[in-house]
Amino acid sequence: MFRMPKYTKPDFNAAVFQNAPDVKTEKAVRDGVVPEYFHSTSIYPEYFKINGAWTLAEESRMDSCVVLREDGHLDVVEQRNVKAGDTVILGRTERCEEGIFLHVDGFENEKEENNDQFAFRMNRSRETAFAKDYQELFDLFEYEKDHGKIVFVMGPACSFDHDARLAMQSLADRGYVHGLLAGNALATHDLEAGLLRTTLGQGIYSQRSMPNGHYNHLDVLNKVRRCGSIPAFLEEYSIHDGIIYGLVKNNIPFVLTGSIRDDGPLPEVIGDAYQGQSAMRDMLRDATTVVCLATQLHSIASGNMIPSFRVRDGIVRPVYFYAVDISEFVTNKLHDRGSLGAVTMNTNVQDFVTRLSKGVR
C-alpha cells in the first residue's frame, strides 16, 4: 500500500540558521526586468530569512524569481511576470550565507544503498526491470485518485493504438486523470481515430495504410474547425470513444499548446507560446503526480514548471514525476536538464498505458 514519505524541516535552532543574516531585496524598476543578482529558484524547498524568521516559498518552480509581498508572503514568479515595484529577493548562495537555504534532503530516503564501487545496471535503461515501478505507480494512483491531482503530459503516440486509446479513456472514466497537457497532434490524431479509425491514415488496429489516408487528419481538422470546438465536433459526429472524448465526457480540463509545425490547428490549441506556457503552469500549479508519455519538449517544460514538493493543509509532501519513453535519450535529457528527480521508464508508451489501466482498480 502507498505510504506518504515524511518531510523533515531543517533544524532552525542550529547555529548556522541562527547566525544567518536576513535576505537582501531590491525593487524591480521595470515590468519584466529583475534586479541584478536576483535569486533563481530550483525544484527543492527553499527557505528565506525575513525579519529573523525562516519562511518557505510554498509554491515554487525552476528558474524563477522570489517576490516578497507586503504581507510577508513569498511569491515565486517567472521573470517576465515581475512588475515594476515588486520586492525581489537577492542572493546566489544557498547555505544560509545570504539568508537563503536550499533543503535537498527533506524527505526520508528509503532507497537501498550500494557501497560497491562497481555494479551492473546502476543507470536505468531499456534493460531495466520495471515491475517494482509499476506496482508503486498502481499504489500511488489509488492514493492520488482521491487525495491528489494526476496530470498526464502526452505525445501523439498513445493515439496511434486502439488499446492505448481505450485504456486512457478508461483511466479518465474511473477518476485517475485530473488534467492533460498535449499538443495539436495528440488531439488531432485521437479525433481522427474516433471518426475514421485511422491515425495519419493508418488503421489504429491493423496499422494498414488506407487509400488517400494522408488526407484523413487534415479532413478531421477541417471538420472540427467548421464545428467551432472539439466538444461540438464530438457531438455532431457521434464520437463515443478515445482520449479526448474521455476528457470531455468527464469534464476533465486539458491544455493544448501549439508548435511551429502544426496543421490546422484545432480551435482549442493555444498558438501563443507564452500564453500556452501560462496555461500549462496553471494546470500544473497544484499537480501532485505528473506522468509524461513520449513527448520530449512537453516533458521538459512540465518538469521545469513544478517543484519537487507541495504544501497541502500545512504539510509538505513530494510531487511524483514519471517520464516514460522508448528513447533513453529523452529520459536522460530530463535528468540532464535537472527537471526533477524523475522516475524514468524506457518502454513503449502504448504498452505502458494499457498496463497502467489494467493495474489500477
Image: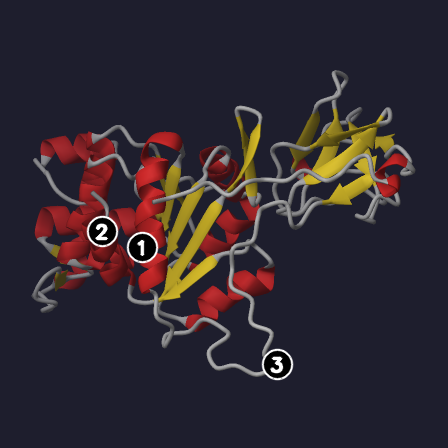
Residue 308 in percent (x, y) is at 56, 45
Q: The C terminus lies in which quarter of the figure?
A: top left
Is 325 positioned to the left or the right of 339 in the image?
A: left
If you read the primary sequence from the N terminus, does the residue marked by circle 1 or circle 2 appear first? Answer: 1
Identify residue for label 2.
359
Name the kind of residue labelled 2 in the image: Gly
Residue 326 in percent (x, y) is at 35, 69
Secondary structure beneath label 2: helix
Name the kind of residue labelled 3 in the image: Gln
Identify residue for label 1.
135
- 3D distance between C-alphas at marks 1 and 2: 8 Å
Is 237 positioned to the left or the right of 111 in the image?
A: left
Name the kind of residue labelled 1 in the image: Gln
Q: Which circle marks residue 117 in the picture? A: 3
If you read the primary sequence from the N terminus, does the residue marked by circle 3 or circle 2 appear first? Answer: 3
Residue at screen point 52% across, 81% down: 119
Q: Are marks 3 and 2 in contact (CB under 8 Å)?
A: no
Can residue 353 be seen here? The reply is: yes
Q: Residue extending furthest top?
A: 71
Residue 81 in percent (x, y) is at 66, 33
If you read the primary sequence from the N terminus, does the residue marked by circle 3 or circle 1 appear first? Answer: 3
Can residue 219 be seen here? The reply is: no
Q: Are marks 1 and 2 in contact (CB under 8 Å)?
A: yes
Residues packed near mark 2 inside 10 Å, few (<14), some (14 to 19) or many (20 plus): some
Secondary structure beneath label 3: loop
Residue at screen point 34% across, 32% down: 253
Residue 356 in percent (x, y) is at 25, 52
Closer to us: 345 or 331: 345
Q: The N terminus lies in which quarter of the figure?
A: top left
Residue at screen point 86% across, 27% down: 52
